[in-house]
Every structure is written in structure tokens, then in C-alpha cells.
Image (tube, helix red, strand yellow):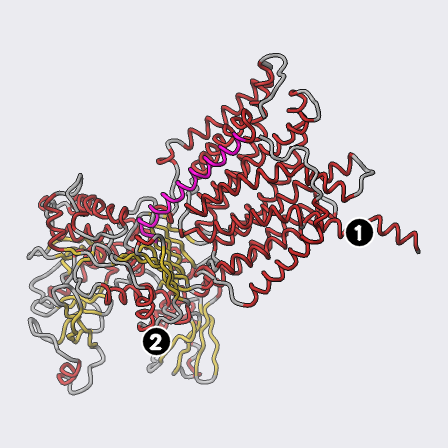
Amino acid sequence: MEFFRDTSFDFMRLRRVCLGLSTVAVVAALGFIFSRPLNLGIDFASGTQMIVQFAEPPDVQKVRGLLEDAGIESASIQSFGTEEDNSVILRTSTADDGGEERTVRIEEMLQQHYNSGVSGFDLNRQGTEALASLLLEADPDDQRASGDDIAAREHYRAASAEVMAHRRDEGLIKDWSAVQPGEALSAAAVAAIRERATFGNFAVLSSDNVLPQIGSELRRKGLLAIAFALAGILAYIWFRFELRFGIGALAALAHDVAVCLGLFAFAGYEFNLTTVAAFLTVIGYSVNDSVVVFDRVRENLRRNRRESLVQVLNRSLNQTLSRTALTSGTTLLAVGSLFILGGDVIRGFSFLLLIGVLVGTYSSIYVASPIVLIWESSFGRERRQKRAAAA
Amino acid sequence: MNRNLILRGLLVLVVVGTCSFWAFPLADKIQLGLDLRGGIHLLLEVLTDDALRAEAQKDIDSLVQELDEKGVSGVTGATESPVRFRLTGVPPDRDELLPDILEETMPYWTWRRTGEDVIFDRRPDEVNNIREQAINQALQTIRNRVDEFGVAEPVIQRQGLGSNRLVVQLPGVDDPERVKNLIKNTAFLEFRLGVYPPAAGVPAVDTQEILSQYGGTLPDHLEIVPQDERDADGNVIGQVYYALEKRPVITGRDLKTARAGLGQFQEPVVNFSLTHEGAQIFEDWTGANIGNPLAIVLDGRVQSAPTVEGRISDSGIIRGQFTQQEVEDLATVLRSGALPAGIEYLEQRAVGPSLGQDSIEQGTRAFGYGIALVLVAMLVVYRGSGINAMVALGLNFVLVFGVLAYFGAALTLPGIAGLILTIGMAVDANVLVFERIREELHNGRTVKASVVSGFGKAWSSILDANLTTLIAAIFLINFGTGAIRGFAVTLTVGILASVFTAVFNSRLLFDLLLSRSGRVERLSI
């Protein structure tokens, strides 16, 4: 199937309108970015981030109140995942400076309020090794009689891993039906667990803690990575193309970075390490799109020297239109499924890729080429020659 | 079929065969990153200043002692910085003693007098030596401890040369707090003579009770050490106090082995044995102190204070109100040796297995749908040649997984995202070529000529387009930590593989098609 066979759209006719629109978009984006701070993730802002799953649907307001009572101010708490996940993601900045112990403090606070009736070994908060120790102490399978504690520990570690596998599938153990005898888990061991352990009302799915010196280091490294990548791409374009095309690609790139960053900030996603990765990809993609068009322009210029630049640009854009649409289309399909199905952990990342592809495609047609035209009419060879003739 | 085709076919087969060998079965060959598998990532700093201060303190003590032996008494010393200390009380006319003492036992200090005091500075090369040693010893100690923990494929390494940071990655471990404590544990163990209460007596309820025994001030050689009282669940409910000799009989350094075991009431205890040297000291001391209490002190807390009932030579039991987990950790830490310096966790990331599981499911689903949608699009748009693109895409993933497996690069969630992005980009090279072939066909060329010229003309665009993305990806690899690097690696490999499959392999398929039956009139594109 061919969508764009021998098209002859006059893209350049719209150049003033589109450049105007793009300028407005860039200014709006920059204004938005600078009007309020970016939502920095803990990679860059440093601080603590925890994802906690509860047995019952959690009250976000209540958790926030608890954190404030515990002296942890400026915490952000949002629900995480789907509704039946009963999970929240909570983030605190380093302002309250709990240092490396902050995660412990938050867990203790949660323990006090959600597990007030729960005491003893908590299957939802302890890990495989701890449960193995508990079983070894109880020794329901009479493994220690032989005197070989190492083998006994291995035995109970396998049993313990089987219990914890349920937590892996469910996130949280909610009732004893999750703890059933199995391959490595004997009925006696299950009885021992039931007797000695219990399960609390929340489980910590992940916890991250970043100290300020690491945060500032990562910020610096992230900026450096973007700067170097930009410089590298520019150097390549400078090497491969004439100046005017370089300027066009650069303008499209700047446009894409600004607009994407603005949209990203507007959507309120968190800016973290993975976002930097997505950004660099968007940069690569943006240039990629412009470069394919310019490749064609260069080829057409060589072949037909009598055509005006406007005509050549239009013709090249039409010739590459099918490719532009198709590549953007397939990439959008792939990135779109990532955005919809990829889950909350990388939602911001896939959002950035998604808008990056859209904006990058637009700019390769309506920013890069018009800028080449403007550059040419202001500083180009013909203009210079005319000036020289007039003088 | 001509030779050239056969050779190219062979090359593709060899590359694909090798990569399949590396990549399959995927479940065994592809390592999952911590974010997918669950586990702990720690970045910690060895506080080497601690080690320097400790070394300086040792030297202060022996300097003071040497001076005392040479008739200069009342000298005191204090560290001013990790690499400098100040001695007070050395009369200026006895300065000539210092060079001799320094040269004999501690030539790495330079000294100068400032008024009443003498300032000592450690030579810079020696400072570096001590820092290096501390880091290497910490690395070894932590490795020993983690090995005991039974982690498969742990990563424990220095973060770059000359850095005082260590990276610890423990895949699959689901007890982050326990691991953190285990690694950081100083477990400073001492056996000390108990002075109050006397043998089999009841410990003091407060420090006042002990002080009153000595008329209000404690003798210099004694120290008050607390013991935690615990309830049945192991929670600390109060403290009692002992007066102990300051000087330990033996310390954790004298231990040869330590093992978790069971005591006479089936309670968890640590069994230990002593080094040859330690055993000798202990045997003499216990022989001389039968009937006296022996306090076992761990990190400044009395664990138990049994009465010495007879001569003990080379092994014994550490008893306390321990849980099984505590004795296991204690045995591990005692066995692994002491940390030379304190540790600070700069960065800690713990991912539970259930979150990783969700990420894997979501990632695979997105991957599956993405690939299916792209393939359908390619088939609709390019019909027969779409199959060519499908083959290229399939091979592309074989190559990417093969290279990932070969280099042991872990697949992370951003890595899966990189793969999904690669799907979109991988077809780009095909699209560029196919579009060119179509154009040439429209211009009335023969199928064969169109294919040749389509590939030829698309090449420059393919090169430019992929190189720009490649440049960005390579900077990411260098910048990247953990998960990001995973993304950059899959993207880089994906780009390279897509150029190979689209240009080399697609061309081969077209050429095979064209060489089959003399003259091909139509191409499904």
C-alpha cells in the first residue's frame, strides 16, 4: 500500500505560519520551564523514594499526615500502579536530612500506624534469609539433629524461598492460604511459620535513598552527557553537511528539546536518570529525521542546479514524505505500546519518547527546512552576490 | 547462484548462528538487571579518615609510652586532623629524643615544634598507603560477609580507580536492611574482666549504684558498660550496668573461627575458636581468674557475663539474648574480620521481587504488542517485501540478545524500552531502502536495477541517520549508571544490528530472489 505516491505538497508555503507557531510553542515551553522548578526525581534532587503496597486501599492524605507528624516535611505521595495494587509512591527531599536512615524511619512510622496490632515476625516485611533463620531456630523438619547447620540452613532457605515466591507474585501476603506446603516446604514447616510468624498490612516494594553529594554528581554527569552528545552530533553534522543545513538541523533540535521539555514539565512527570536517557534518544531521533531530508536535498541540489531552493526543499520533502510517515508511524506504534502497557515505572520515559517522535517529525518538515530558507535568504550566496553587485 | 551470494549467505548464517548460540535459551543466557530481578544496589563510601585517625592514635599511644620510658612523663597527644596530631607536654630541651623514636618505629611522621607543642604530620605517600589499605581491606571484609550470605553473582567492586567508593550489587536479595547492617557492622568484640557485680551477682540498675561502690569516682582502669534488657520478642525494654576492666583480655582479632550453633538449652549461640596466640593468652588468664566474671562485650554492650569455671584454652561460646538471625550475622561478621573504617551509604536502591516481576510482565507485553503492530504495518505497506523486513527484524533481535549475552550485559527495564525503540528504528533502514526501490520502479527501471540503485542511494541516508543516534547512545553508555547503561547498550547494539540486518541481510534476500529465475518482472513492494 502506498500512501504518498508522487505527492507535491507545497510545504514551504506554510513555512511562515509554522515557524510562527513553533516560535510561540518554544517561548511558551521555555516560559513554563523557567516559571517553576522541574519535578526532579531523587536521582537528581536526592532524597528518599519508596513504593509501598498496602493490604487495604491506602488513604494518601493520611499517609502524608503521618509523614509530617514524623517530621518528614515536603513529602510527595501519589498512588502507584492500578487501583487494585493499593500502592503509593512516596518521595521526600533531603531537606529534613534523615541521611541514610530515612527509609528506616519511614518504615517504622508505617509500622506504628498500620501494624499496631501486629507483633513478631512479619512475613511482609522480612526477607528470605530472615525467614530461613526463623525456620532454622524452630527446626520443624529436624534438620539440626545431624549437627550440620549449613545443610540445615540450605534446607530451610529453600523452604523460605517458596514462601517468598508468593510475595513475588502477589506483592503482599494477605492470608494464610498463600502459605501452603510445597516442594521444599513441608507441612510441619508451614505449621511452624503459622505459629511463629504473622503478616502485617503493608510491604515495601522498593526503597531508594540518595544522599545530596550523589544527587549533585548525577546532575552534573547528566548535563555533561547531554552537552557532549549535542556537541558530538553537531560536529558530525558540521562535517557532513553545509553550514546552512547544519543551522537548520540545529534549529529543529533546539525546537524539539525546548518543546519536549516544556510538554514534559507540563505533564508533571518526574525528571530522573531514565529521562535523561529518553532525552538523548529524542535528540538523536530529531537529528535523524532532519538529516534524512537534508540528504535528499543535497542530492537534488547536485542533480538539478537550476531549481530554486524552495522548489528543491519542497520536492525533497515530498520524496521523503512516505519514509518520514512510515518510520514515525512504526516508531510511534512501538513507543505507544510502551507508553500504554509499559507500566508506571517508565511512564515518564515513554511519554518523552512519544512526544519526541511526534515533535521531531513535525520539526524535520516545518522547522529545519524553513530555517534553511531563511538563513539562505539572509546570509546565503545569492544574497551576498546581489549585495556585492549593488555595491 | 554465484560465489558472491554464497559467501554473503554464509557470513549471515555464521553471524546469526553465533549469536543464537550465545543468546538461546534466553532465560538462561540473558542476565536480568536488579530492577527486573529484584535486589539491592549500594554505593558506599569507606571513611578512610577513620582508619587514619585510628592509626594516628596508636602512634600517639606508643610515642607517649616511649617518652615515658625515657623519662618524659605527663605527655598528652590528640589528633587534630586525620593526618596530623599534636603532642603537649614535651619540654623543648628534650626534642632531641623525638628523631630517634620516630626513625626507629614510625618514620612516616614529620614533626615541628610550635611553642609549647609539637605537631606531627604524616607523609603524603604514607597517607595514601593507609587509605588504599583501608579500602582494600574493607572490600575484602565486605566480600567475605556477602559470600556468607549466599548471594548468587554478587558484584562487589571499587567505583573506579583511586576512589574510596565501593559498589555492592546483590541480585535477588530481599532483606535490604539486614544486608545493610551486616555490611556496616563493626562487631567489635571484647572479653573483659568483670569487677562489679561480683561473680553471679545482679548487675546494677543504674550507674550511681556502681559509683557508690567506689566512693563516687571510678578508678582509672575501670569503665561502666551497659547491657540491654529485652522482652520475649527481643525488644529492648531497659538497661543494666556493669563495671569492667578497661583493658580487654582478648578481642575479636584473636578469633580464628566463629559459627552459629545451639547452646545447652537449645538457644542460639556463637561457637568460636581462638588463634594460637589468642588461645595462649586466654588459657593463662582464665587459669588465673577462676571464679571471676568474664564479660563478653559487643560494640560497647555487655552480652553476657558468665563466671569462669575453669581453664579455657582455644574455644568457647558467646551467649546472650540472641535470636537465630543475630547469631548468624554475628558469626559472619566475626569470621569476616573487622572493617578498618566506618562506612556511609551514599546511595541505596532496593527493588523487591514483585515490582520487578510486574516490570517484566509489562515490558514483555509492550514489547510483544509493539513488535506485532510494527510487523502488521510493514506487511500492509510493503506486502511481499514486508516479509523481508520481518526477517530483518527477527534477526535483529537475535543479534541484540546474542551480543548482550556475550558481554554479560544485564537487561534492565530501560533496556527493554531500548529494545522496543529499536523495533521502530530498525525498520527505518528498511523503509529508507524500500522507498528508494519503489521510486526507482516508478521511474520505469527494471526490478534488478531498482534494487541495486535503491540500496546504493539509501546507504548515505542510513549511515547519517543511524550515526547521529549512535553518537547520543555512546555518550549515554559512558555517562550511564546501572539501568541507563542497560538502555544505552541495547540501543547501541540495536542500531548496529539494524544496519547489518537491513543493509546486508535484506540485500541478500533481494539478490537471492532476483537470481532465482533469470528475469524478475514484478517485485512485491
Numbered disc total:
2
**Which is more toward the observer, A230 or B341?**
A230
Residue under mark 2: which chain is it in?
A: B
Q: Which residues are magenta?
A: B351-380
Residue depicted at x 70% and y 49%: A14
Instruction: Give the percent coordinates (x, y) of residue B132.
Output: 43, 58
Please identify the residue farthest to the bottom as the structure is shown. B215
Residue under mark 1: which chain is it in?
A: A
Asked whether residue B369 is drawn in magenta, I would say yes
Residue placed under numbered mark 2 in the picture: B64
Could you tell me which secondary element the residue under label 1 belongs to?
A: helix
Name the quadrant containing residue B462.
Answer: top right
For label 1, count other residues whose C-alpha is less than 10 Å away and answer few (under 14), some (14-19) or many (20+).
some
Does label 1 lie on the same chain as label 2? no
For label 2, count other residues whose C-alpha is less than 10 Å away and answer few (under 14), some (14-19) or many (20+).
some
Instruction: Give the percent coordinates (x, y) of residue A68.
Output: 34, 72
Residue placed under numbered mark 1 in the picture: A377
Q: Is residue B510 left or right of residue B225?
A: right
**Which is more toward the observer, B104 or A310?**
A310
Residue depicted at x 27% and y 46%: A169
User: Marks 2 and 1, Cα distance to the nearest angstrom?
Assistant: 85 Å
Could you tell me which secondary element the residue under label 2 belongs to?
A: helix
Name the quadrant containing residue B470.
Answer: top right
For badge 1, the amino acid type reads Ser
Quarter of the C terminus of chain A within the rendering: bottom right
For badge 2, the amino acid type reads Val
- Evaluate whether residue A350 shows in this view: yes
Query: Looking at the magenta stretch, what is its main secondary structure?
Result: helix
**Which is more toward the observer, A31 or B356?**
A31
Asked whether residue B483 is drawn in magenta, I would say no
